[in-house]
Image (cartoon, rainbow, N blue to C red):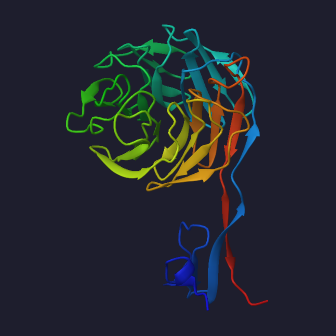
Amino acid sequence: MTVYNTIRGLKVKYLSSDPATSESGQVWYNSTTGSLRAAGIIGLASWSAGGNLGSARTNGCSGGLQNSALYAGGGSPGGATELYNGTAWTGSGAMNTNRFGHRGAGTQTSYIMAGNDPSTAAESFNGSAWSNETAYPTSVSGIGAAGTDAAAVFFAGGAPITSTFYWNGSAWSDQSAANQGGNANNGPMGAGQSDAVYMSPTELTGVQGRTQVWDGSSWTSVGTSSLQKSNRSNMGTVSTNCVAAGGAGAPYSVECEAFNGTSWSSTASLASPKGAGGGAGTGSAGLAFGGNSSGSPDVTAKTEEFTGPVVSTQTVTTS
């Protein structure tokens, strides 16, 4: 006879209330209600079309949420900035310098970016205009970044660069004891707007697809991504719920993966292939936009909106 702990590897927990978070397939007994409860997916992850960028661009910097995102620079290079309201993109103040291959962290109204192709330049955005900031400590392109305008971590990139630097809103500090093990390279992944952020550099001199989590002072190696792609569109405000969409390579990819803080799993694919595009939002409500795409033209203005799987808790009955 098949039993729950055989198929799930878990015992049915005896709880006084439903857990605050649960995963699909988890079962427990609620002693307060006297009922057997189970969590199950009632809606699968999916992508849907959003409003197109005003100009097709690749390798810009991006951030914010699904209904309040930004995309700046990139292209030839360029300095154009566009803001997304959940439906359409509108133009905003241009960057002080045209850039390509830069990355940043923060929200639509409070954002910090660094790098170029390559450069030590840094700029911040207040929702309408850009201001020059203290130069990044080393010349970089295609780095990873996560956090907020007042508390961000920038890492990796280049040829390769294994440094990690912290931004406190006005100055950079070298996290000299925290590097990515000598294997970081161009196009790492960065996501998060809390103290928990993560990276997944995929063009490595060592293990392909290695993922590390940043706890504010050091990196810890966790699960490995199955896709060997760099320059993916990244979304997620916490390291326990992130999505990596598409990616550069031959050819550009539609494949996407979700990260739960420990391991990666496949999730819904993009409608169109994408590499070196922008990403914003959470692991449950995200955006992927712009970037390189297979076909002609090879740079896209398309925006796709991500909706994560919906898990519902139900009472188990015999009827």
Q: Is residue 166 visible?
A: yes
Q: Is residue 128 visible?
A: no
Task: Give the side of residue 139 with respect to residue 10, left or right.
Answer: left
> Number of numbered discs present?
0
Q: Nearer the viewer, residue 258 or 87?
A: 258
* Identity of the residue furthest to the right in this view: 319
165 in relation to 91, above or below? below
Could you tell me residue 147's position as x and y percent? Answer: 43, 37
Q: Nearer the viewer, residue 30 or 157?
A: 157
111 in relation to 182, above or below? above
Q: Nearer the viewer, residue 163 or 104?
A: 163
Kindly indicate the quadrant of the structure image that contains residue 296. top right
Could you tell me residue 290's position as x and y percent? Answer: 65, 25
Q: Nearer the viewer, residue 168 or 75?
A: 75
120 in relation to 14, above or below? above
Kindly indicate the quadrant of the structure image that contains residue 209. top left
Residue at 56% in and 29% down: 108
Residue at 74% in and 27% down: 88
* Identity of the residue furthest to the front in this view: 250
Which quadrant would the N terminus be assigned to in this image? bottom right
Task: Give the side of residue 92 with respect to residue 16, left or right.
Answer: right
Task: Give the side of residue 60 with respect to residue 269, left or right.
Answer: left
Residue at 27% in and 35% down: 182
Could you tell me residue 268's position as x and y percent? Answer: 67, 48
Kindly indicate the quadrant of the structure image that contains residue 65. top right
Residue at 66% in and 36% down: 67
Task: Give the side of residue 260 with respect to residue 298, left or right.
Answer: left
264 in relation to 276, above or below? below
Could you tell me residue 89's position as x and y percent? Answer: 70, 24
Which quadrant would the C terminus be assigned to in this image? bottom right
